[in-house]
Image: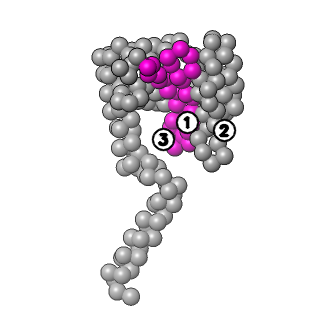
């Protein structure tokens, strides 16, 4: 074996080791983690600017941050939004709470305040969330993998009415 071949094999083994240590999640790699954090900060800043300029996003922000409570220990990690076919504002949280506790919290809160449970997914290889609606709003509480520090999201959406389509 030549020195060049040994060097290539060594680099390949090193690359495999780094990816394995990162759990096959690129965000676990040092450079990617910093880039992901910068992207979250950029997205949060853009969302905050969009909220300042849009009455609809302001309404959703108020609903999601002032009206709807969060379980104790929810720490805001990021904000995000949709503004084309679906209008929503979302919040990513980090929490040590188990999903069943979070789900029970919202299964109690929403019905007591006139919200209807419209959808529930409990995993089975797919997403895990509960969704509620009231008037022209939909709120979804999702459990995530938590790889980027966010293990829950709460998304508040403005539903389009038939008059919005005209």
Q: Which mark is residue 148?
A: 3
> Would you place residue 3 above or below residue 89 in this image?
below
> Would you place residue 160 above or below residue 66 in this image?
below
Specify whether residue 7 is in view.
yes
Q: Which residues are magenta?
A: 133-162
User: How many residues crowd around disc 2 within 10 Å: few (fewer than 14), some, or many (20 or more)?
Assistant: few
For marks 2 and 3, give the one nearer the viewer.
2
Is 76 left, or right, of 118 in this rendering?
left
Q: Residue 94: where, in percent of width, then height?
A: 54, 32
Specify whether residue 57 is in view.
no
> Would you place residue 40 above or below residue 20 in this image?
above
Q: Which mark is residue 100?
A: none
Q: Residue 7: where, in percent of width, then height?
A: 36, 76
Is residue 113 or residue 68 the one in the foreground? 113
Q: Residue 155: where, in percent of width, then height?
A: 50, 26
Is 92 magenta? The answer is no
Q: Residue at x 47, y 60 (%)?
A: 19
* Among the two numbered marks 2 and 3 on one chain, the one whose residue lies closer to the N terminus: 2
* Among the two numbered marks 2 and 1 on one chain, the one whose residue lies closer to the N terminus: 2
Is residue 93 or residue 135 the one in the foreground? 135
Q: Residue at x 46, y 50 (%)?
A: 28
Q: Residue tagged by mark 2?
A: 122
Q: Residue tagged by mark 1?
A: 151
User: How many residues crowd around disc 1 within 10 Å: few (fewer than 14), some, or many (20 or more)?
Assistant: many
Q: CA distance from mark 2 to mark 1?
A: 15 Å
Q: Quadrant of the rendered structure where residue 122 is?
A: top right
Quadrant in which the C terminus is drawn: top left
Q: Residue at x 35, y 38 (%)?
A: 39
């Amino acid at each position: 074996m030549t020195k060049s071949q040994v060097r290539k094999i060594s680099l390949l083994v090193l690359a495999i080791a780094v990816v394995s240590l990162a759990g096959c999640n690129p965000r676990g790699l040092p450079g990617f983690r910093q880039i992901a954090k910068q992207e979250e900060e950029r997205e949060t800043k853009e969302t905050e600017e969009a909220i300042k300029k849009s009455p609809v996003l302001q309404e959703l922000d108020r609903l999601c941050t002032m009206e709807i409570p969060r379980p104790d220990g929810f720490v805001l990690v990021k904000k995000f939004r949709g503004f084309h076919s679906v209008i929503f504002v979302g919040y990513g949280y980090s929490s040590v709470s188990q999903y069943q506790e979070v789900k029970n919290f919202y299964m109690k809160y929403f019905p007591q305040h006139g919200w209807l449970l419209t959808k529930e997914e409990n995993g089975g290889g797919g997403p895990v969330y509960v969704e509620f609606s009231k008037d022209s709003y939909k709120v979804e509480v999702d459990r995530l993998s938590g790889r980027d520090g966010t293990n829950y999201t709460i998304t508040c959406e403005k539903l389009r009415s038939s008059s919005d389509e005209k």
